[in-house]
Structure formats: C-alpha cells, structure tokens
Image (cartoon, rainbow, N blue to C red):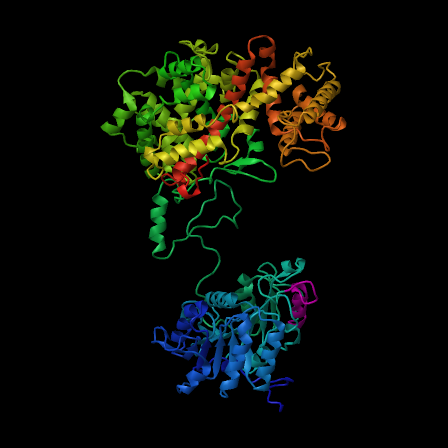
Amino acid sequence: MQKTSNGNFKYHVGISSLEQIATRADKVCVLNILGSESTDVTPVGHAYSGGNVVFGTSPGRRGQVLETALGGVPVFNNVREGLEAGLRFNCGVVYLPPSGARDGVAELIRVNPELRKIFIVTEKLSVHDSREIRALGQHNRVDIFGGNSLGVADSYQRVRIGGALGGDNPAEILKPGSVAIFSNSGNFTTTIAAYLRMGGWGTTTLISSGKDIYIQYAAPEFAFALANDERSKAAVLYVEPGGYYELDAQFTKPVVACVVGRWKSRLARPVGHAGAMAGGDDDAAAKEHWFLEKLCVDGVFTPDNPVVSKQGAVVTNIAFIPAALTAVMRKNGIGHDFAPEASLALKPWFGSNAGLDLPKHLDLPEVEAIAPYGAQITQLNCQIGVTYPRQSMKDVSGASQMDPQTQITSLHGTSLLEAARHPMEANLLLALLREPASENDRALVNAAIAAEVNLYKRPELAAAEASRAAGNSPNVALAAAASLVGPRRVETARRICTMLTDRFAETGLADVLDENFDVRLIGADDGFAKLLLQATPDPRAEALINAITARRARSVFLRFLHSLGGHPTHDAVLAAIATTLAWKPLMRKRISRATAESLPWWLHLFGVLLGASVSAIEHKPSSFCGVSNEKLMNRYSLGEIGCLAIVGRNKADPGSVFIFDTLIGLLLSNGPGTISAQGAKGAVSADGPESPDRVQLNKATIGFLTHSGYAHGGNGYEAIAFLIEQFKETSLVDPGDANHGIDLEALAAKTAANYAQYKSERARGGGTGLQKIPGVNHPVFKDKAVNHDPRERWIHDLLTDRGEYNVFHAYYRALVKALFEVGVSRVVYCVNIDAVIAALLLKMLWQPYRDGLLSKSALESAAFTMFIHARMLGCAAEIDDHMNRGRDMDMRTAASQCRFVA
C-alpha cells in the first residue's frame, strides 16, 4: 500500500491539524441511530452543529425518523439504502453493540468511498476486532477514533460528532479559546472544558480518545495535529493507566497532563475503562514519570507546590488544571483567553456541621442557590423537622438492623454493645430522638418519668393488678395498664408542644440551654396562656418543676413558663420538657414534628409501664417501693427506678443499677423481624401511618406486649432456672465475690457428666425430645475449635475492666470446656448472649431469692419484666419509625402468599 500519511508516521494519518477533526463541512451517518444512547445525544449534537447528521441506520426501521430541533433525520435499514437515496457523508458514527461494531465499520468503508473519519462510541471491543478495524481503516485511508469514545467537538466551528461532549447544552460549555483537550474519559472531557472556562480558558478541539485496550487515534496523532493547529496554544491531557501511547507522543506546545488512577495499581483486572489496567510499567506512577521528564518538571503540581515549566505541568486532580495551565502559560508570556468566569470549587447551597467544630478549610460557607432552587431551599429551611418518604415497611426498618456475621444489632446506628455502656434514660432518648443524650437531657427525662411511676389509686394500676390476679403474665398486665394511656391523656400537652415549637422556631432559637435568650420575644395570647397557666398551683406541676431544679436541669421553655407570672399546668411543664428534649434533633432534621409532638405521650406511657410493673402494695400516697416521691423525682435515674420495679423494694445499689442498665442496652432490639417488633409495627400499620395523628402509641405498645410471651421474652428464665438448679446445693452468698469458695470446674464437670449420661440414654431410646442446655452454643458461632459469641466476650471484657466478677458467668465458661472434655461436643461451644443475660440478672436477684423474698415464679416474672423494660424502648423506636415512614396496612401479607393446610 502506498504511504499516504501526514507527518513522520509509518502508518496512515489523514488528519494533519486539529481544526480538521470536526468541521462544518462534515456530514455524518449514524449506525444504530434509534438506540437508547443515540436517541439521547444525537439530536443535541445535530442541532448544535447546524444539522450535520444526514441519515442513520436501524435494521427493520426504514421510513422512521429521529426527531431533532432542526427536523427529522431519516432512518434506513442499512448504509447502502441511504446512499441510494442520494444522501452523502464523510463521517460515520458507530453505536452498535461490541459484537457488531467491526461489521458496522466494514459496511461504512465498503459502500462509501467518500468516507474519511469514523467515530466508535461502542466500548469493550475485543482486541481481535479492534485490530481488524485498524487494518480496514489503514487500508482505505480512513481515520478512526475510539472505541469507547464520546466523540469529538470543535468550539470554534460549533460542531460535535458522535457522543455527548459538552453535555445537553454544548454551547454553554464549549467556549472558543486556545486550549485543546485530549482525554481518555469522555465525561471528564466535558468536565475539564467546564473547569477551563471558569478559569478563563476556552477550547479549540476536544477529543474523547476512549480507553478500550486498543486506542485508534492516540496521543502521538494528537500531538502531531496539535503542532499544526494555529488556534491551539496549549493542550490538556487526561491520562489513565494502561498503554504506551503517551510515551511516544512528541509535544511542541505546552501541555498540562492530568494523570490519574494510582489506586488501580493494587488491582489485577480492568476497572471502568477496559484499558485502564494496572500492574505493568504503564501504570499511573509510570505515566507520571514519563510526563515529568517530557515537561521538565521535578514534581506534581498542587496549589501548595506549584511546580511548572514552560513545557507544562503534571497534576493528579482535575480541579488543579486551570491553575496549573495559567501558571504554565504565564511562563510562556500568554494570558487568559478571557476573564475568569467563576470557580468550580464546592459552593454548598445548604449544609449542616452537625454541631461539630470543623476546621476552616472544611467549614464551607453556604451561598445563594440559583433559581428556582434558591426559593425551594428557603422553603425547605422553613420546614421544621424531617419528612421521610413513605414506603412499605413490612420486614423493613429505619431504626434497627442486625449484622448477620456478628449477630450484633444496632439501633439508629448505635451498636447494642455500645448502648449497654449507657444508662436506661440515654437509651430511651436514643430510641426516639435518634441520637445520644446530653447530661441535661438525661436529667429532664429522669424527672419526667419518675413523676409518672407512682400509680397510687390510679386506674392503670388497678387494671394491671386485676390482670395479674387473673393469672396473666407480666406483658399482659402491662398491656392492661397501657390500654388506659390513650391519646386524650396527653392531648393538651401535645398541643402545647406544637405551639411552643412554632413560636420559638420563628425566633431562630438554636440552643435550648441559652440563658441569654430573651423569652419575652415569645408572645402568649389569651388562648395560649389558658393552655399554659391556671389560677391555683398545680401540685404535680410544682413537684416536677422542683425536681428539675433539684437536678439542675435547664430549659428555655421552662424559663418561658416562669416568665408568664402564673401557675403552670402539669401539661405545660411536660410539654416544655418534651420540647426541650426534641429541639436539637428537630432543628437538625433528625426527627419529624410527629415524633417531637408525641414525646409527652411516650414519657407518660413509659412512666406508667414502669410503675405498673410493681405490685399495688408498693404504691403509697407519698412513696414508691419505699422511696419517697420527692426523692424519686429529685434524684433517681431510670435505672434505679427499674431496679425497684424488678425487685419490688428499695434495692437500687450501684452494682444492681449497672447490671440493670447493661441489660437494658443489650436487650433493646433484635431487629425488625422479631415477633415483638412485628406486633408493634403491625399495630401502626393497622392504624394508618399515612395519617400519623391517628396512630395510637399505646395501642402499638400493646402490640409489642401481646407479641411477647413465654417463648419470646419469658424464655430468658430457662437459663436462670438452669443456674439455680446447678447452684442449689452450694453455699453461694454473693455472686459478685470471686472468693466464693466453690470449685466451678468440678461443678461444671459434674453437670457435663450428668448431661452426657442423659444424652446417651436418650440416644438409646431413639434420641427424641432431647433437652439442650440453655445458654450454650449458637447457630452462627459454632465451627471453630474454640467458639465465642462476640457479644459474650465483649460483656466479659467490660466487666473485667470494671473489676466486676460474676460467678454464674464464670461457671458457664467452665461448663462449655467440660462439655467438650467429656465428649458431649466435638468443639468447645460458645457461651451465648442468653447465658450472659441470665448470669447478669441472677446476680442482681440472687440475694433476695436466697433470702426468700423472691419465689421461683417471681424470679421468672422478674426476668420477663426485665425483657419488657428493655424491649419497650426498642419497639418504641420501631413504632416511631413506622409511623414516619410506613404506608397504611403495609404489614399485611398478600392472599397469594398465604397457604392453607388441612
């Protein structure tokens, strides 16, 4: 074949200057013009270029047209039909699948002797097909671009051929100037043009070379055409790993090379572009070195290290390209093409530092958004609280999730192991407010709930007592009490919450603890004042205010009540507390208004459930479980109150409170799939969460309670009963005393031997009905020589760090080894989390049980009640989440998925 190449190439290169790549004289035929990609981008390029597409092909669609702003582009079955219709073209664009691209190129070349350029958008062409395409182009003196290219564009001539350079509005991005762009990435070709324009640099010709393994029009051809283009004074290259094309390129004009992809050196296969392969001496580090040598610089350009030469600069971040180019051109005595238009640095329209004190370079100022977004953002900023999109919440939760590998559940992103470190009141607020509680928050919630637990002569207590007298389990007794805590009980308090939120939000209040906030800014008209004040003192309100003062808690809303000069009602004080607790997460849009305004109901309900857990005999006019009402409200935490409820008397020593709070954290949730959570979510679904005001929180709590039972909730007693049986003949006095004098290894060996004998006898009898030892083994943690439940190990380490000892936990650890040694197990079983919970709870209750103050049935009720107190918080989170996100009746199962059995 006779050599017809421009320049010194040993192969055909028909293009001698960048201005020849895309011209107004070019006419285009598009293969697969009605494909999904072409139908999006061809009409835009056609209109921008003044109508350069003469026809397209799509087999079987002859006679159809591709609609554009300049009229319809005719479609034919194949290229020959278009030519026979009298249409002429010199450029072909290929949108065919990889398997058809080679044949498409062959068709274009075979039937059209006028063809001079082909642009292949198709990506992931095989090397074999790419070589054949190369041979076809060389033999017929056709320049080919791609594959995996987004085409080319010329800013001066307003032409775009193949692909989407310049986006949906090329005229906005492609402003004429003096810089050519050659990029392995199609999308970044446009992005770089936008960065340059903002920095005062326009473009000449833009080429998306593509990044298949085989690049048809590569860096050497670009460098040659750049040298001959009088318009182009410099070039920007965007370079990815893979290939040696750039090594052979000889540049005679300034170049800024953006070399990316160092992270790909750790990969062993292509990622993204097929040619962006790593692992050889053509990786990103190697290419950086090539360009450092070519451009005579000794380092990569950054704003802090602006290394440039007259030949150019190397960057690794496209954001640095405009600055690097400006510095290079300044060395060459060349100024901007036009005044810089703006900066593409991040300019947030809205943001939140989430209460964090950020460094200056991260604390970005907000700017006014362009229309129409500015008005929409202003409206959004006026919205109080978050609004979640509605969806079916069946077997779905935005509150809890379990890690299938560790079996550790998290609630609002907080691991239950972490929750076990915090007191009950903190976990209550985590459940409802979705974030950790401050010391002030804990003081407020302790006072508010302590004010509700003494139910002396209250109907809720009578209902619970009647239920217990009828032989019901603890969950049913509490459900009876909860049924009386209906929406009317807190209707006024919730209404006050709404009004406080509206009025204080208008002032821009940020910090509810701000002692300098002028509460006189808040008006209290007659209607509002009637809700907040009464003529005579309200004893319940006075007691609650005194409790808050005693706990040194603060609230701007309580200061507002005091400023009114009358006697606040109990509803007003409760609403003030609830609004204080909710304010920060509400303003940060962590919770919804529905959540914030339901908080008085939850506080009242939790207090009633704690109080109703205790027999009526412990509720006196001025005391609860032997603790005065004043002391309870002024000093007791929820953990201490919970201990009273479990034991039924004044037994709130620090050790017991620690165990109680730890158990509350561990038992908060086990994910949305648990029976108790399903009951709570089902109740919300039935009320209709799309009208959140109709959701009855007490009824949803009853759904949780009725879906707890002896197999789910009460089953924790099995391990307690097992431990009692093993220790009944010992002289154990204090389970927390490491010097207890009991040979735990011998005790465990005896239990293991007895169980081995029992198991052998059952096997001889057919092996049916084998009872397992509770608290031992786990279906996930079972396949190692020595197995551990990570939750059990975490609790063990926590107790060890605190200097705490638990003889029951130590016994379980000895038991799993003994079971292995006598051959009951082929591996050492893990001690599971149920055993830990039983050990912790029995340690707390051992002395009252041993002293005869707790019967075995009372012990079982205590274990069940412990579960209820913890899980009512986790289920409250599920209830609130479902109320905010769910759809009406979304928990139902379709009839088609139900089965009948006879």
Image quadrant in which the N terminus is located:
bottom right
In the picture, measured across the screen, residue 16 lies left or right of residue 497, that is: right
Examine the image and state in which quarter residue 526 appears.
top left
Does residue 284 show up magenta in the picture? yes
In the picture, measured across the screen, residue 145 lies left or right of residue 48, that is: right
User: Where 777 sits versus 848, above or below?
Assistant: below
Indicate the position of residue 396 as horizontal and vertical percent values. Answer: 46, 40
Examine the image and state in which quarter residue 602 appears.
top left
Indicate the position of residue 44 as horizontal and vertical percent values. Answer: 40, 71
| The residue stretch that appears in magenta | 277-295
User: Where 779 sits versus 300, above or below?
Assistant: above
Outermost front residue: 902
Indicate the position of residue 533 as horizontal and vertical percent values. Answer: 28, 22
Please say whether residue 25 is visible from this viewpoint.
Answer: no
**Which residue is more in the foreground, 516 or 448?**
448
User: Where 290 sits versus 833, above or below?
Assistant: below
Outermost left residue: 526
User: Where 411 sits versus 247, above or below?
Assistant: above
In the picture, measured across the screen, residue 783 lies left or right of residue 555, that is: right
The residue that appears at 47% across and 19% down in the rendered structure is 474
Examine the image and state in which quarter residue 240 appears.
bottom right
**Which residue is more in the foreground, 13 or 404?**
404
Please say whether residue 203 is visible from this viewpoint.
Answer: yes
Indicate the position of residue 295 as horizontal and vertical percent values. Answer: 64, 71
The residue that appears at 45% across and 77% down in the rendered structure is 30
The mark tally for this picture is 0
Does residue 848 show up magenta in the picture? no
